Image (tube, coloured by chain):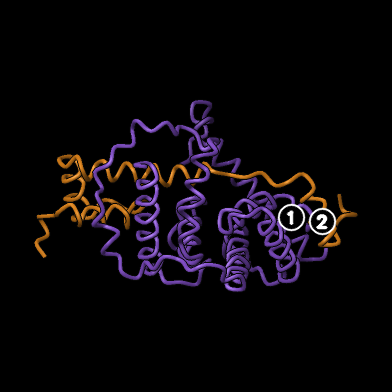
Chain colours: A purple, B orange
């Protein structure tokens, strides 16, 4: 039996708070699906920063990120009636924004990306590096930002997507597979290659 | 493959594949043991973690006018 004593109150509070947020969100989604425009606007407000940030992390360009954000919410407004609540709204939105990012990347086709099909080279690198003395303690550092941007831009958007969804946004492997319409083994395979590639690129930059 | 013996390359593969996953499998235990003993792999493990952490903390704020433009684009600007 659940013991919600004063002693346990602090322990359970975050879980109760999360439940309330989810219940409120379910209610807002229902209202929006019934045509309540204020509820729709509220959903947009709740997720606009998340979607913008995600889009930026994929395309590394502020104008493109804003364009993708607009297209994502336009798609959401058009198809919200299809949302069945079987997944979290955020996961459903990640799926939409991922599609828009990939569509834009395919349209641009601006540069060749590194091939990670053969991962032999990824794991043959001199890996015994010590980063403990690096001056980069904060991602507010512009030099570090530039290193991070340059490294991830070399990855194809398919790999970027998996890395950002799983490692940066914190979706589970299963949710990432759902958002990208890939199998769980395919997600794992792309993820480990993307991680190794980025780590090696950073290592090369730090050794310069 | 010998399940008891793992080399550095096995460890690197496994680290990259399994970060954030269930680490209680038989093979994972062998990997963890190897990690404790091999400074090269331990260092690799730490640098992969730092790489992820850097990308996780690198966030951007939406431009100030982006919200207004978005609401207008969606014809929801009267719902503010």
Q: Secondary structure at mark 2?
A: helix
Which of the two residues, A204 or B50, is positioned nearer the viewer here?
A: A204
Instruction: Tell me whether circle 2 and circle 1 mark residues in contact (CB < 8 Å).
Output: yes
Q: Chain of mark 1?
A: A
In the picture, residue A134 is in which quadrant?
A: top left
- Secondary structure of the residue carrying tag 1 is helix
In front: A207, or B8? A207
Q: Name above or below for residue B40 compared with residue A173.
A: above
Q: Which mark is residue A44?
A: 1
Residue A205 relative to residue A73: left or right: left
Nearer the observer, B5 or A36: B5
- Report the chain holding disc 2: B
Residue at x-position 52% and y-position 45%? A146
The residue that label 2 is drawn on is: B71
Residue farthest to the front, as pictured:
A208
Residues packed near mark 2 inside 10 Å, few (<14), some (14 to 19) or many (20 plus): some
Give left or right: position of B61 versus A86.
right
């Amino acid at each position: 039996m659940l013991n919600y004593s004063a002693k346990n109150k602090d322990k359970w509070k975050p879980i109760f708070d999360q439940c309330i947020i989810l219940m409120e969100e379910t209610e807002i989604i229902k209202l929006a699906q019934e045509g309540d425009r204020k509820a729709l606007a509220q959903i947009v407000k709740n997720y606009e920063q998340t979607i913008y940030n995600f889009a930026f992390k994929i395309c590394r360009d502020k104008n493109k990120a804003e364009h993708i954000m607009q297209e994502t919410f336009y798609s959401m407004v058009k198809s919200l009636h299809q949302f069945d609540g079987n997944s979290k709204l955020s996961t459903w939105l990640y799926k939409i924004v991922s599609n828009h990012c990939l569509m834009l990347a395919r349209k641009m086709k601006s540069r060749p990306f590194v091939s990670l099909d053969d991962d032999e080279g990824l794991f043959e690198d001199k890996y015994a590096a010590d980063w403990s003395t690096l001056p980069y303690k904060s991602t507010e550092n512009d030099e570090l930002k530039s290193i991070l941007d340059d490294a991830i831009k070399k990855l194809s958007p398919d790999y970027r997507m998996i890395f950002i969804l799983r490692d940066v946004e914190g979706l589970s492997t299963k949710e990432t597979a759902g958002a990208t319409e890939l199998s769980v083994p395919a997600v794992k395979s792309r993820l480990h290659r993307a991680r190794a590639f980025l780590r090696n690129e950073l290592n090369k930059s730090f050794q310069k | 493959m010998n399940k008891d013996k793992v080399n550095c390359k096995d460890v690197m593969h496994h680290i990259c594949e399994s970060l954030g996953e269930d680490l209680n499998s038989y093979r994972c235990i062998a990997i963890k043991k190897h990690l404790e003993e091999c400074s090269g792999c331990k260092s690799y493990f730490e640098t992969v973690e730092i790489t992820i952490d850097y990308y996780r903390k690198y966030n951007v704020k939406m431009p100030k006018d982006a919200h207004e433009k978005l609401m207008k684009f969606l014809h929801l600007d009267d719902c503010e």
